[in-house]
Amino acid sequence: MQLNLPEHQFTIKKSANGLTIFDVLRSKFVALTPEEWVRQNFVAFLIHHKQFPQALMGNEIALVQNDIKRRCDTLIADREGCPFAIVEYKAPSVEITQKVFDQIVRYNMVLRAKYLMVSNGLQHYCCKIDYDTDSYSFLPDIPCYTDIIGM
């Protein structure tokens, strides 16, 4: 499916259970679902077009919230290894709604990242959290890592 992201070449292969795609962050092949297609394209976009360091990124990062195990779609750390940004993905057929933002905000109650990003591959949102004023603001575009690391 065509997404609203730059095209990137991926390693895709057939397995007994269907198509798989190589995830460079997890260093393994994973099932190629519509949501996974968005994740792989968005991660490639962050690395190759927005200069996010691959070494500071992880997919499907486990966290515990209220004694419930959950998984953050993508976690980006700062140079000290602290959560810096988290990304939530949905399949292109899934509309980005308040419910999606509520989900990423719940994860952020544990992680306390400065940036939250949401994408369904067609629409992308990024907001900056200001913990001093207990507020947030949406950015007009997904910023480059070098532009926000010093903010």
Image (cartoon, rainbow, N blue to C red):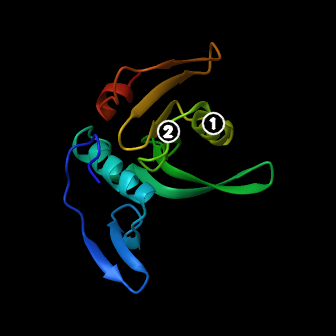
State the residue position of label 2. Answer: 95
**Is residue 18 rendered to the left or right of residue 102?**
left
Looking at this view, name the residue that lies furthest to the top. 133
- What element does badge 1 sit on? helix
Q: State the residue in front, 145 or 140.
A: 140
**Is residue 5 rendered to the left or right of residue 126?**
left
Residue 147, given in percent of the width and then of the height, sits at: 31, 26
State the residue position of label 1. Answer: 99
- What element does badge 2 sit on? loop
Give the amino acid at mark 2.
Glu
Q: What residue lies at 33% left-to-right and 34% top-to-bottom? A: 145
Q: Where is 128 relative to 79, above or below?
A: above
Q: Where is 9 relative to 117, above or below?
A: below
Give the amino acid at mark 1.
Lys
Q: In which quarter of the image is the N terminus?
A: bottom left
Q: Where is 67 relative to 48, above or below?
A: below
**Is residue 143 rendered to the left or right of residue 67?**
left
Residue 26, given in percent of the width and then of the height, sits at: 42, 65
Residue 44, given in percent of the width and then of the height, sits at: 28, 50
Looking at this view, name the residue that lies furthest to the bottom. 16
- Residue 45 sits in quarter: top left
Crowding at label 1, few (<14), some or many (≥20) Cα neighbours within 10 Å? few
Q: Which mark is nearer the camera, 1 or 2?
A: 2
Residue 127, given in percent of the width and then of the height, sits at: 48, 26
Q: State the residue in front, 75 or 91.
A: 91
